């Protein structure tokens, strides 16, 4: 039966501390990239270059008539939200 030397214990503690430090730094990097990223940015590659396009929808530009139910719902929602704005209409 062999006894663990003090040097072995220190080496194991140092290796554990190094692994923990790497984990903390990796977590900090992920959090930094997550909070400072702009839309479309990848983790390591940055923002993609290129132009985004969309196909115009002719029905999207047409004015839509609101039904009575939609008008009533909008009126009730505005009345409810007025409570949180201190009674001031926007």
Image (tube, helix red, strand yellow):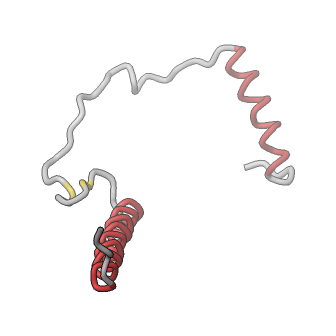
Q: Which residue is outermost to the front? A: 1
Kindly identify the residue that appears in the image at 32 percent across and 66 percent down: 26
- For residue 68, side relative to residue 33 (left or right): right
Where in the figure is residue 39, as x and y percent of width and height? 33, 53
Kindly identify the residue that appears in the image at 25 percent across and 57 percent down: 43
Front-most of residues 35 and 69: 35
Give the answer, above or below, for where 26 lies relative to 5: above
Quarter containing the N terminus: bottom left
Residue 45 figure quarter = bottom left
Where in the figure is residue 54, as x and y percent of width and height? 24, 34
Count of picture labels:
0
Front-most of residues 55 and 40: 40
Where in the figure is residue 78, as x and y percent of width and height? 76, 37
Front-most of residues 11 and 69: 11
Kindly identify the residue that appears in the image at 28 percent across and 79 percent down: 8
- For residue 54, side relative to residue 81 (left or right): left
Give the answer, above or below, for where 36 lies relative to 67: below
Residue 74 figure quarter = top right
């Amino acid at each position: 039966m062999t006894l663990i030397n003090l040097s072995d214990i220190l080496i194991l503690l140092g290796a554990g501390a190094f692994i923990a430090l790497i984990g903390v730094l990796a977590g900090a990097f992920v959090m930094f990239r997550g909070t400072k990223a702009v839309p479309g940015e990848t983790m390591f590659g940055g923002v993609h270059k290129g132009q985004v396009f969309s196909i115009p929808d002719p029905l999207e530009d047409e004015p839509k008539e609101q039904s009575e139910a939609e008008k009533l719902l909008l009126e009730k929602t505005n009345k409810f939200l007025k409570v949180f704005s201190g009674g001031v209409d926007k």
